[in-house]
Amino acid sequence: MFLKALYLDERYGRLSDFLFLSTDAMSPKITVELLRQLRQAMKNSKYITEPIQAYIIPSGDAHQSEYIAPCDCRREFICGFNGSAGTAIVTEQHAALWTDGRYFLQASQQMDNNWTLMKMGLKETPSQEDWLVSILPENSKVGVDPWIIAADQWKSMSKALSSAGHSLVAVQDNLIDTIWEDRPAPPSTKLITLGLKYTGLTWQDKVTALRGKMAERKISWFVVTALDEIAWLFNLRGSDIEYNPVFFAYAIIGISNIKLFVDSKRLLDPAVQEHLELDSPSKPELTIQCFPYESVYTELQAVCAALAPKEKMWICDKASCALTQVIPKSHRSAIPYTPLCLAKAVKNPTEIQAMKMAHIKDAVALCELFAWLEKEIPKGMVTEISVADKAEELRSQQRDFVGLSFPTISSVGPNGAIIHYRPLPETNRTLSLNEVYLIDSGAQYLDGTTDVTRTVHFGTPTDYEKECFTYVLKGHIAVSAAVFPNGTKGHLLDSFARAALWDSGLDYLHGTGHGVGCFLNVHEGPCGISYKTFADEPLEAGMIVSDEPGYYEDGSFGIRIENVVLVIPAKTKYNYRNRGSLTFEPLTLVPIQLKMINTDLLTQKERDWVNDYHKTCRETIGAELERQGRKAALDWLIRETQPIV
Amino acid sequence: MFLKALYLDERYGRLSDFLFLSTDAMSPKITVELLRQLRQAMKNSKYITEPIQAYIIPSGDAHQSEYIAPCDCRREFICGFNGSAGTAIVTEQHAALWTDGRYFLQASQQMDNNWTLMKMGLKETPSQEDWLVSILPENSKVGVDPWIIAADQWKSMSKALSSAGHSLVAVQDNLIDTIWEDRPAPPSTKLITLGLKYTGLTWQDKVTALRGKMAERKISWFVVTALDEIAWLFNLRGSDIEYNPVFFAYAIIGISNIKLFVDSKRLLDPAVQEHLELDSPSKPELTIQCFPYESVYTELQAVCAALAPKEKMWICDKASCALTQVIPKSHRSAIPYTPLCLAKAVKNPTEIQAMKMAHIKDAVALCELFAWLEKEIPKGMVTEISVADKAEELRSQQRDFVGLSFPTISSVGPNGAIIHYRPLPETNRTLSLNEVYLIDSGAQYLDGTTDVTRTVHFGTPTDYEKECFTYVLKGHIAVSAAVFPNGTKGHLLDSFARAALWDSGLDYLHGTGHGVGCFLNVHEGPCGISYKTFADEPLEAGMIVSDEPGYYEDGSFGIRIENVVLVIPAKTKYNYRNRGSLTFEPLTLVPIQLKMINTDLLTQKERDWVNDYHKTCRETIGAELERQGRKAALDWLIRETQPIV
């Protein structure tokens, strides 16, 4: 499943034509009264010293998470639009929502006529800044909650506004919250402690390693704001946000201090207390001081007040404006990727072993699913939704299953061409022997996170479908089998995935791969494989990414072949400048449907790759299917992994 | 021949080991007295209001040219180091030079012990900013000539210094010039006027088109500072800078004004007068107002003073700080690539035809050269320098020859592994039947610019040499035959050139291609093929770039295969979203030595490419050789273009 941010491609302009979502059943949210209340709040001296002329409602949370909790769905609350990306701005006279091509139809159906839809990516659509400048009276104040706008976004918006004589102001009370009567409470789910068996390193080891990195760069403090970084550092997981096993927290790590900000109720659990050594720390510098989640601001102020003149503090440049601005500029070192983000991306041997185990179990579930589908589809009762449910049921039978890692994309025929499709009752299609079926799904297990896409046909695919599938497969193999020097950035591999499609005049408008967490977020930085990112970090042995080229024929079908792959050292004939080489090892071990392949279009090397891959699937997954006594799936696996000649 | 800037690769760290230049004959310049004089000037109230504690001497000219005229070699004058890249900084106590790995040895040999060599790319080497901050007394002033520092460089240096309590100050009188007694006069060579036959468009057409672009973006003025843009716009050429047919000038283009700043003597030439319609402009808005070169500053001030409040002025963000700062911020629109840079890059049909003609003539000269070499080498008297001279002689026999487009790289055996090698008497090797020979050369003709590299063996190459050559060839073909969608940026093709080398653990540490001008600079923006550039503009039909992968075995041999290629529309089976596809057509038509190819390593598609290419060489160049009556070269061509099976 690809990184959401990869969908929108400014290079190719308009995506609106093909990224539609059938939303007949949606009716717009009535917002007259809400807008009236918000506009009153914008003038209410209870919240602000001077009235503001515009209020920006971004879609993120205080941690700039990709997925957010219900209590943070403020943009959806005010305008009705519930897509993953969008920014609302309300002025005294206007209300407008900016979103990208994949959501034009959905947004227009979910919003009432108090709202103007700003179609991002179209030439005629003004940027938020330009629009504000064009409609605001002179010397206007534009408000935003500094906790949910990232520091880098604040910077550019503030610059644009002030160069036109306006100003961006931080409104401490979130104005949406002041009018949101039944706003859900912030979640505070039970924490899971992860032992060495899963993590390979204690949190104490990780803190010590982090401090080593800080010392190297003469950094005395590091403010950790990304939820997955905190979860990884402390070997803890939560379920505050659906699909992402994280929990709301902040941490401030000093050379001899560890300050953890989290709802104190969560720390009453004896397992957590013991895990964090709250009562009896092994070493003084590994003592965790616990604070309420909300006190991060004042505590950071206190830390900053005590800084020596030359002391430096790390914070990610995507952290909230609110926290970033607490740190005086002279002490602040804003970095694009934190050392935790980098450390987390390079999996250690225990994590790699655990991820492999999770992928074996996941493959077992999928083999079962496909065997079941072959039997059930002819009966005509299997739908996109029922497959998704069945897949979840089969995965949940596997040991250490926790939940899904993202909403299953289960799509038949033309629905497959909607890249971000998610079946809804009103769009749900029945699987048949006549259409291509695409399923992109994954799960969280205690030992790892999975994400796999297979595209199959249960009848006879057309020559054109096979041709397109084979180009996608050639691209998938080109990345998976690529050998490249240590130090290569993932974006340099993206074209390998496209070459076969390009040769025939085809392409796909999303990136080829994203980093994958280990029982963590299914999308994580700092590496990936996409023509759109240049600031990615070089690939390293131990990193895990997805390899998922595709092809989408509007109104007909969608094809995507996705494996999660591990970066491993490659053996090469020579070793230029002793740099060493890398390649990928597939962790996903689910057969690629032979029926969809036009083998004439494959080179001998590609045929060998398919056969080797299927041999590994048969051996590794076959053994586990046998162990679990899943006979039907085993038969299916053996049939689907016959070598091609 | 690759873009100089592409050599230094921060990703791979140290280049010093392999990028050496044998400079035994070099002795350091004695700089004691010069440094004393410069340090006096740094305190001399004749030049500066307050003493400066450091003075920066960049290596560029006022137009940020890649190649510079002798009068602009100020950095060489002060420290002795004459490599193409380097920045000198002199403080009251220290003198230091920053340069990159290809020049470490050369710089250390050319500079005396008053200078510290700062080896860029090594971890322990401080940046100029960090070094200055570490050694300057508090509140220091650092001076620089604002004409030879680019606006974007000024900005970052100024920011770094002021955040440490110092300041960067513009010193209007260049302090090097004040102590450089025998400084050469700025060149003012005769101008060449180019007719429609070469340019396809009159300068009036070009100005009108430019104004169209300006109107589109509501820009009322454009300050043109790049010498090749001015030459292209006015269909004029000069020879102020070796190898680059440009002339020192500025232009300020308004919606109804054309201001040209050039040494007035050059305009006395009746041909130039007529060409520019100085006496009788066809239309009032196409009247060129001529000013002395030096008055650009005051004239720009005058234009700026008369600007209406919302008027905007374009200037390239790489233009000099001096000119950039004349334009008030509120009126300034600094752009990374100017519309002239973009227009110049997309060659029109006349230019394409002319470039093809130039490449045919160039190939004739090279076929002659190779035929001559085969005959002469066994005699044992042919050296790197004598081949370079012979190549120039043969090229000069061709119609409309003007000069070389860069210094010929002629290298035997281990010298070939020095990527920026240029034969000097003390390094000159004799060609033999036992070593690989690499020649990278090109010329300026009135109708176009050429740049071609061939690697050949006159005896029997080793299996390893052939293997490496074949990988390089596979990379060359992979780029040349690539099909890719309209809108693709060149850097996305770079990995295609490396895949075959990477597979065997090999690589090369320079980019794959650069833009090529049409009887203009052999290196031009805004397009190219390099993993190091992200800000390149998408490739478009009509653009011309080089395709030049290589492989360099330290101490043994260098391999590079370079063609200049034209971006053309590609016919594909499908046409996804009507975007259209592109591919390349080689303009360079010189056989690739079959003897160096291990044909077993080629796919059938690659063999077909070689045969098709050689068929075109034989037909096109054969016809011209026949017409010119060059029998020996024709025989050589026919033998060297036999199809492989």
Image (cartoon, coloured by chain):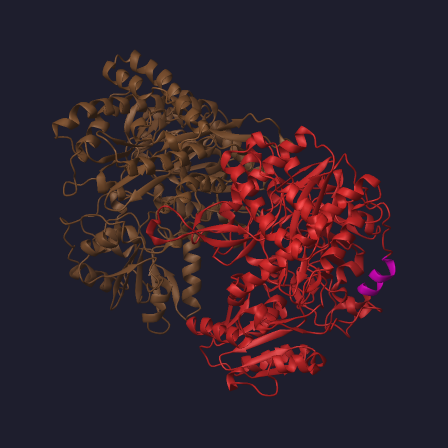
Chain colours: A red, B brown
A269 on left or right of B114? right
Seen at 47% across and 81% down, the residue is A308
Dividing the picture into quadrants, the one containing residue A73 is bottom right
Q: Nearer the viewer, residue A383 or A611?
A: A611
Q: How many numbered discs sit on the rendered protein?
A: 0
Asked whether residue B422 is in view, the answer is: no
Q: Position of residue B42 (x, y in %)?
A: 27, 63
Quarter that holds the C terminus of chain A: top right
Q: Position of residue A240 (x, y in %)?
A: 72, 68
B92 on left or right of A204? left
Q: Nearer the viewer, residue B45 or B242?
A: B242
B448 on left or right of A78? left
User: Which secondary structure class fits the magenta region best?
Assistant: helix
Q: Position of residue B129 (x, y in %)?
A: 37, 64
Asked whether residue A296 is in view, the answer is: yes
Seen at 44% across and 74% down, the residue is A215
Q: Position of residue A298 (x, y in %)?
A: 63, 80
Q: Where does the magenta region start and end?
A: A31-39
Specify whether residue B291 is painted magenta.
Answer: no
Q: Is residue A534 above or below residue A401?
A: above
